[in-house]
Amino acid sequence: INIDFIEKILDFSKGYSKYGEDISGLPSIYSARLYELIPLGNYITYKIEKLKEMFGVSDKYKLNSDFIRIVVERSKKELDNKTFSFDYEIIKKGRSFHSIRLKGYRMNTKWKSF
């Protein structure tokens, strides 16, 4: 289990999340996984290669742009239909995608985007 997920579960300083309502019926496991990893209202940055490892798709999506398009953008569309969604920003090193910066929000209380 991811240590960030465990810390999120054990941190009740901001109340609790209605986990089932937010992600029930999602067609993709990636959407649920991103829901677990993205904090509400705070930014978090992941190296794209690390995310691909965590999702078990390092060998499936050789290009980071494919991973963003197929996994991240598709998950965002799925979560946009729920009470939770996220914004993201790609961070590049030179011409290649290096990291992704994510910020979660409730659909009825969206924070300012990047």
Image (cartoon, helix red, strand yellow):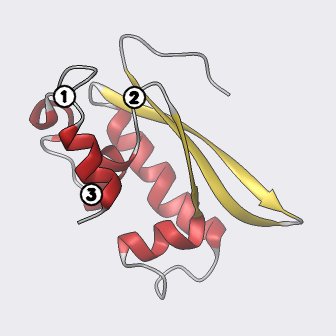
Q: Which residue lies at the image location 37% right of the left edge and 50% below the top edge?
A: 34
Residue occupied by mark 2: 40
Mark 3 lies on a secondary structure that is loop
| Residue at far bottom of view | 59
Q: Earlier in the sequence, mark 3 or mark 2?
A: 3
| Marks 1, 3: nearer the viewer | 1
Q: In which quarter of the image is residue 19?
A: top left
C-alpha separation, residue under disc 3 versus residue under disc 2: 20 Å
**The one of 95 and 18 positioned closer to us in this rendering:** 18
Residue occupied by mark 3: 28
Q: In this view, does 51 lie to the left or right of 84?
A: right
**The one of 29 and 4 positioned closer to us in this rendering:** 4
Q: Which amino acid does label 1 sit on?
A: Ser
Q: Which x, y percent locates residue 43?
A: 55, 36
Q: Which residue lies at the image location 45% right of the left edge and 60% below the top edge?
A: 71
Mark 2 lies on a secondary structure that is loop
| Marks 3, 2: nearer the viewer | 2
